[in-house]
Amino acid sequence: MQNYTVSGISKDGLVRGVAALTTQLVQELQQRHQTMPLASAALGRTATAGALMGAMLKQEEDRLSIQIMGDGPLGTIRVDANGRGEVRGMIDHPEVMLPLNEQGKLDVAGGVGQGTIYVSRDIGLKNPYQGNSPIISGEIAEDFAYYFTASEQIPSAVGLGVLVHNQRILVAGGFIIQVLPGATEENIRALEQNIGHLHSITDLLAEGITPEDLLYRLLGEETQLLEKRETRFHCHCSRSKTEAMLMSLGKEEIESIIREQGEAEVVCHFCNDKYHFSRKELEKVKEKL
Ligand SMILES: [Zn+2]
């Protein structure tokens, strides 16, 4: 099935939600970064959160960046997303593995450690919106729920699931549910009950639940579906941007690269694509300065 996000609002208009299927997106991240299962889960959950938050952006050109800066062995996780459904991501240490946790699951919390979640959202205003909150669990979904509730003051529930078997991503997806102003205790209780009934998001995804069905289960059968958007891996790096980066190093630095290495290979950390510049091409870049 194609990867997509779908947004919806409860019949009474007081609870909104967005749900996503992100299996191929997470598979592509796994392949590009050669992540081991623990990093596949951590990066995959964060990328799914990015896809969901991207679906909440109004304009196609709106963008957001997420950084989970924990002190655990996985290092920092970065994800960028935009209103077109494009998502890219990276993790400092894709190779890290830890023993399974007490529940026999991948120990994402142990891999992430303690630290801070940063979110920056560029929606075309003069300054991008920036928010942050402490990592409270390291399991990522709970951390985003806390982020929305504490930093953006929107009571939220978040579910993120990545089912990993060895190096393979079997299924991935998730949801963000947000309570709007005017919601009553009763709304919140009903929502909590629905979330309680869901138990494992990963199990539901493995059973083949669609993002639409997830919203119906969480927000009620009469949920009004609003917008469906395709979501996929896409990195906006390019040869011309890489050339601009080289130029920003300055003439002397480029001269020393030519002298010492004779050529340059620039790797984009978000997609691992390589841009090769021969001596002749480096000379041309230098001449432009
Ligand atoms: Zn790239």
Image: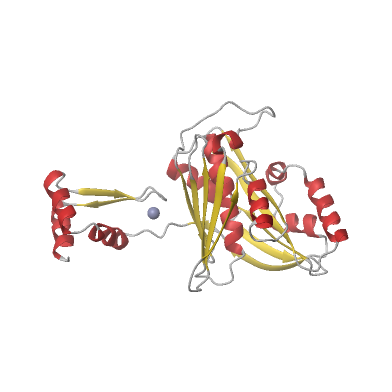
| Frontmost residue, 141 versus 154 | 154
Q: Is residue 285 left or right of residue 121?
A: left
Residue 165's quadrant in the figure? top right
Query: x, y percentage for residue 113?
Result: 56, 37
Kindly give the residue lying farthest to the left in the view shown: 259
Kindly give the residue lying farthest to the right in the view shown: 186
Query: x, y percentage for residue 189?
Result: 85, 54
Residue 88 visible in the current orientation? yes
**Image quadrant where one finds the C terminus:** bottom left
Looking at the image, residue 28 lies above or below residue 15: above
Residue 24 visible in the current orientation? no
Residue at point 77%, 43% (across, down): 199
Q: Is residue 285 left or right of residue 175?
A: left
Q: Is residue 124 left or right of residue 23?
A: left
Residue at point 57%, 49% (across, down): 46
Looking at the image, residue 18 lies above or below residue 127: above
Looking at the image, residue 186 lies above or below residue 203: below
Query: x, y percentage for residue 144?
Result: 63, 51
Residue 219's quadrant in the figure? bottom right
Residue at point 22%, 49% (across, down): 264
